[in-house]
Image (cartoon, helix red, strand yellow):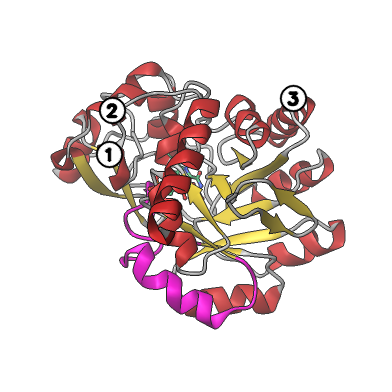
Amino acid sequence: MNMPTLTIGNRTARLPIVQGGMAVRISLAPLAAAVAESGGIGLIAGSGLEPKELAEQIRTAKSQTSGVIGVNIMVAVSNFKELMESAISAGTDLIVAGAGFSRDIFAAGKNAGVPIVPIVGSVRVAKLAERFGATAVVVEGFEAGGHLGTDRPMLDILPEIIEAVDIPVIGAGGVVTGSDIKRVLGMGAAGVQMGSRFAATKESSAPEDFKQMYVDATPEDMVLIQSPVGLPGRALRNAFSDRHVAGDNPKIKRCTSCLKKCGKEFCIMDTLVRAQKGDVTHGLVFAGDSAVRIKDIPTVRELMDRLVSEWSLATEGASA
Ligand SMILES: Cc1cc2nc3c(=O)[nH]c(=O)nc-3n(C[C@H](O)[C@H](O)[C@H](O)COP(=O)(O)O)c2cc1C
């Protein structure tokens, strides 16, 4: 038996696996192209990039694969509109919109014929997204890495949203293995989105120390931070998170007004860029709860082959 395919708009991926967009500069062309080339959907994270750089990343990824390449942009970033326009003109196959919701994004997607896929955490927002013209939705639960829009686990919210909307629903948060994928698809989801598992692959643009923190993570290492975006975020414990939790945030050195609204407790961009450049002690290392189940740093091809065979085993086991 083959894994089901995943269709979003007029593009179909051979596998129902979306590699979640991960800013800043964790999921770039090398990761997205490798995922798309292996049959999934690869997403380049646009937040924190200049529109021109995002376009270059999309063109590079597209030159390496004929698979499905999209972008993830956080609605909360000031240059969301410019990034979106740049992604559309560079030929993105879809736009996943995280960390916030705006009705304005749907018209631009519709005019350009590019599917808009918002990340949602409740039936209310999922229905709103469908009404405004979303092609699909990603339902992200509290266990996910990065900014969090709900305090409920994905497996709790997923059935409610599948019931409430008629567009494809993709489950995100805590998916690491082929048997996790089987469980989510078995609930009626059209696909899964996985972030942490792909952050710790060879092709991810996270530095080696960042990937190794995932491999070494224990449940005690998981922390929640309060992001200046106005949402909590799930990360791995380090000197930065210890200071943050103690209320001793690093001072903002330079503000580029990168967010539409910023609480200014600390500079989210600076801490994410720091971690991506290799300072995993003083930077912010976003990670999902699932990091504790990650034990190696495979290539994307190795990982995708493994996910397919684990899914097959779980599926055959269930039907035997
Ligand atoms: C390091 C990291 C960075 C992330 N950055 C973004 C982002 O820029 N925009 C977004 O919508 N989601 C972001 N996410 C969430 C992922 O796209 C994905 O939905 C999530 O990781 C799924 O949960 P999982 O980590 O348990 O697989 C990030 C996650 C991680 C681990």
Q: Nearer the viewer, residue 284 or 236?
A: 236
Farthest-out residue, front: 320
Q: Which mark is residue 64?
A: 3
Write down which quadrant ligand 1 falls in.
top left
Disc 1 under 8 Å from ligand 1? The reply is: no
Would residue 68 appear left or right of 126 to someone viewing this image? right
Q: Give the residue pinned by disc 1.
A: 293
Residue 50 visible in this rendered orientation of the protein: yes
Kind of residue indicated by mark 3: Gln
Q: Is residue 140 visible?
A: no
Asked whether, in this view, residue 35 is left or right of residue 104, the answer is left
**What residue type is disc 2 on?**
Val
Residue 179, image x, y percentages: 39, 50
> How far across and how far down the image is residue 66, in percent?
78, 34
- What's drawn in magenta, residue-wise? 139-168
Q: Earlier in the sequence, mark 2 or mark 3?
A: 3
Q: Which residue is mark 2?
A: 215
